[in-house]
Amino acid sequence: MSQTGLRIYPSKPSKVYFYATCLLDLLDPDGGIAAIELIEREGVEVIWVEKQSCCGQPAYTSGYQEQAKTVALSQMALFPEDHPIVVMSGSCAGMMFKHYPHLFANDDIYADQAEAFAERVFEFSEFLAHICRAKLHDQGPLTSVVLHTSCSGRRELGIHASSQALLSQLDKVELKKAEYESECCGFGGSFSLRHSEISQAMVEDKARHLQGSGASYLVSADWGCLANINGHLAYRGEASRFNGQHLASFLWQRTKGAKA
Amino acid sequence: MSVQHYYPSQFKQQASDALANQTLRSNFRGAMDYLQQKRKDAFSDPQELAQLREHAENIRQRCLSKLPQLLEQLEKNCQANGIQVHWAEDAKQAQQLIAELIQSQGATKVVKGKSMVTEEIELNQHLEGLGIECVESDMGEYIVQLAKETPSHIIMPAIHKNKQQVADLFKQHIKDFDYTLSVDKLIQTGREALRTKFKQAEVGISGVNFAVAETGTLCLVENEGNGRMTTTVPPVHIAVTGIEKVVEFLSDVPPLFSILTRSATGQHITTYFNMISGPRRAPERDGPSEVHLVLLDNGRSQAYADEALRKTLQCIRCGACMNHCPVYTRVGGHAYGTTYPGPIGKIISPHLQGLAQTSDLVTASSLCGACEEVCPVKIPIPSLLQRLRHDAKLPAAEQTPSLKGQASAASWTEHTAWRMWAWLSTHPSIYNWAMAVGVKLAKYLPMPMGEWTRCRNKPELASQTFHQTMKRRASKSVTRSATGGAR
Ligand code: SF4
């Protein structure tokens, strides 16, 4: 499996599993609904597995691999059939795609299962752009948007271009570029708490560069980054002007009147 | 002369000080932007780059897989060439060994080329204690030495200083310095000051970039010519290297050399490339009459012993990981308190200094992966960081004796908290209930989020969770319970 974005994609399935991720669960249920609407509009049935909780990444990046494994096993068991699993955050998708196989690499019983599971994991924008090959029909007024690509989307999954590909289909939306686009926003899970001063320096720069793009909207396909950047914008009292939203919400708002 | 000291155990404080220093921050940002661009220009074809990296990684892995044999072969072939080979297990042994070699010559004046491994063993301070003057001959190192500091970057030791600061230093230390901010003139001034030192030196010390087992050749990559002077002018040359720098064949060198310089400074080739294969021979008219090679372990065999951690030793010290690291860019090299800063420092220092001292370093990464993306030999730095985080946290009973300082960051409360988290995450009905209650009560809870709210507002929780929203959603989507797995 490569990190170069050269994954070979399957053809559009009839059904997918939906993995909402814990941040979407707590912070942005509407983003989840928007994503489901978009997928359903492509003629794909969405299976929501209620028992899902967390992908295990927080424990994994904190050095608690045993706990991460326990949680990973429980999640893998929730998706028994062969449908693709659409994940709403780059970092959770990266965890399932790249790190589940790592976690179980030397495990006689689960190594193959983790590999097979990872093969079925697709991040939301990746799924919509590369597997559904969605054609989007823009219904909104003229505006501009800046995209924040996440590090895991970029470097663990190699899919930073897929959000861009979707946005660039919106013909009344100008896609603006931010400086230092590929640089981390400084979230990094527990990093933002353990090394909060460094994290602060990073998110301050990120927010400044995003705003410097002059775009009216900020979107990202990763709620980890968004929680960080939005939190900082709110702290500076600038959230109302430039509050980041999930790519799915933006795409759905722009295209909901349209047919697939 | 006592050098300004920094410690990895003080990382947080040192990082905090660095963040508050605006000059330092702008010096680093400017320098890193420049180096990133240079590297980008040097690798304009992504496919070629991918092939080069693959090739370089293969070479390094092959050589490491035979490390013990290659070291023996290197020793044999060096000796056949007239190079005297010495082994040092740790920093102290290396210091003593080198000091004895110098003292046995009755020497008191030494010049040194840029060598991180001699920084690692704090050679200058040791020699100075013995009354031996050891002058740095690399311009960056020379500046840093004048400032009584340690290098803040492995390729560009004085990158944290701007020309103004360098000019001020020269004014303080160099007689008759005609104050100027012209970079060319500053370099000229430094060069002239060093010229006399080369002539006076009785011993020259250098590092090694590649030690070739096949031929017993020591390769030295440099730009200033000071490396050539250091290794040829004084009558005795002592080369010092970590044991991992050995390569099998002479033909392994060109691909590594080419990817090293392009990753480091964007240069396709350096101004000088020295190949040292022994002391001056009978009819030859120049070169040292003695060449010594000191091979240093200092914790490297600990990394070698573990298949995953061994990848750390693939490093060819190009510094690209630093140049692209968002943390390094903001705090600079000194904050780390280690000889090797930045991403490589975070994974190599635990072997050199133990995890107890360095456990803050292994967490000081957002795991963004920029380092792994640029590393010319494809060291999976983020995965290794996670591995080291794990080792630092291992509860004592699970310790295997492979890594110094294992379990040093273990905390019963933290461990218990993660066990509870794992339990909660595998009990969906309780998990969902807890989340639903959480979003309802959030506004009444004080939620101490200390470090988060340093520069962010508390996250605004939705009025109901996605789980709850989906319960109410009428759609053709199937909401269903899973067949197995989570209890
Ligand atoms: S870890 Fe890789 S990028 Fe960093 S210095 Fe070593 S070779 Fe260069």
Image: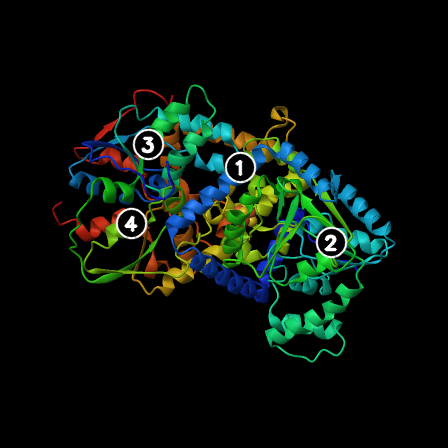
The amino acid at mark 1 is Gln
Kindly tell me whether mark 1's CB lies below 8 Å from ligand 1.
no
Element under label 4? helix
Identify the disc placed on residue B205.
2
Is A180 in front, or is B446? A180
Is B481 in front, or is B16? B16
Is label 2 or label 4 in front? 2
Q: Is residue B46 above or below residue A93?
A: below
Is B178 in front, or is A123? B178
Query: Taking the image as drawn, is residue B406 in sight?
Result: no
Spot occupied by residue B180 in the image (x, y as percentages of width and height): 64, 79
Q: In this view, does B469 lie above or below A221?
A: above
Q: Are marks 4 and 1 on the same chain?
A: no
Side of A47 relative to A64 (left or right): left
Side of B341 relative to A228 (left or right): right
Q: Are marks 3 and 4 on the same chain?
A: yes
Q: In which quarter of the image is residue B44?
A: bottom left
Element under label 2? strand
Q: In this view, does B99 lie above or below B243?
A: below
Spot occupied by residue B234 in the image (x, y as percentages of width and height): 77, 58
Identify the disc placed on residue A119.
3
